[in-house]
Amino acid sequence: MIGWVHKVEVQKTIKDPTTAEDVVEEFRDFAAIYDQEVSGENLQGRTIHYPAPARLTKLFLSAAKLKAGDRCLDVATGTGILTQKIKERRSHIHMTGVDISPEMLEQARAKQLLDEIEVVNAEKGLPFATGAFKAVVTCGVFEFIQNERRLVNEMARVTAPGGYLAIAALKSDVLDDIQIPGFTRLGYEEGIGYDIRDAESIEQSDYIFAVYQKNGPA
Ligand SMILES: C[S@@+](CC[C@H](N)C(=O)[O-])C[C@H]1O[C@@H](n2cnc3c(N)ncnc32)[C@H](O)[C@@H]1O
């Protein structure tokens, strides 16, 4: 968690040249304790609140009309927290999860919420056909991505016409108030993505939450 937070702080001003190997390494050991860390429990004098997945889910599902069997891709699903929030409210959605970290995906797999799981470096592209998903969602990955616009374009590509794209991400020059060609924005909010409290300090992160619909017949 410390590593993640450190990166977030740095990347508010300058992009940290994190490599894919660094990310995999960082989440290798973190995977087993990730859910407990972000659960709001007081761990060794520190408490982390991570409202971003629940907030994005609320915004996403209030805008998106989804029916049984619709395919949804969770990019950088991690341990599957965002997928879990979505499945709690729409249990009939077919969920695919991709992430660069095999260890994070193993935690997600154990929850048995995802129908398909694949190890993918999303920076290099998403290994799915154009328009393959009725919805594409992501939470908390852009701070690890060097070319944010490219990942947005890739997520846009695999979204079906009439489908939805939902993003929760640390505020950045690229993502603030972002417009996506060929998409109509259905909702946009800014707010706290997570906060970390200890005896001396409270550290908050500013996130954007956005939901779009791809133009064209559903
Ligand atoms: C802060 S966690 C967020 C996980 C989950 N979405 C959540 O909200 O709990 C960031 C995740 O992004 C993944 N990640 C970072 N860079 C990635 C990349 N290039 N491709 C795919 N996943 C990546 C990490 O492995 C990690 O699981």
Image (spheres, rainbow, N blue to C red):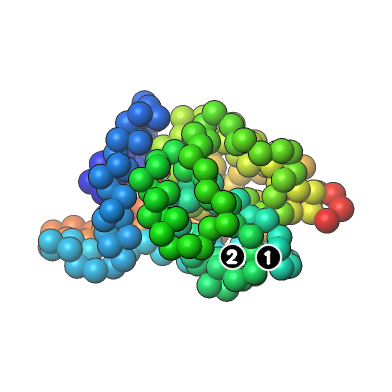
In the picture, the quarter occupied by the C terminus is bottom right
Where residue 135 sits: x, y (%)? 67, 54
State whether residue 65 appears in this view: yes
How crowded is the residue under tag 2: few (<14 C-alpha within 10 Å), some, or many (20+)? some
Q: In this view, does 19 lie to the left or right of 57?
A: left
Where residue 50 sits: x, y (%)? 37, 61
Where residue 73 sits: x, y (%)? 60, 51
Image point (64%, 69%), residue name: 92
Image point (25%, 45%), residue name: 29
Total numbered badges shown on the rendered structure: 2
| Residue 131 location, quadrant | top right
Q: Nearer the viewer, residue 90 or 94?
A: 94
Note whether ligand 1 is within 8 Å of mark 2: no
Q: In which quarter of the image is ligand 1?
A: top left
Q: Which of 206 and 107 is in front in this view?
A: 107
Q: Which mark is residue 63?
A: 1
Where residue 138 sits: x, y (%)? 53, 50
| Residue 69 location, quadrant | bottom right
- Pointers 2 and 1 in contact (C-beta within 8 Å): yes
Note whether ligand 1 is within 8 Å of mark 1: no
State whether residue 52 appears in this view: no
Q: Give the amino acid type for the residue marked by disc 2 in the picture.
A: Leu
How crowded is the residue under tag 1: few (<14 C-alpha within 10 Å), some, or many (20+)? some
- For the residue labelled by badge 2, is the local secondary structure a helix, a strand or a loop? helix
Q: Give the amino acid type for the residue marked by disc 1 in the picture.
A: Ala
Q: Which mark is residue 59?
A: 2
- For the residue labelled by badge 1, is the local secondary structure a helix, a strand or a loop? helix
Residue 191 higher or lower than 16, as above or below: below
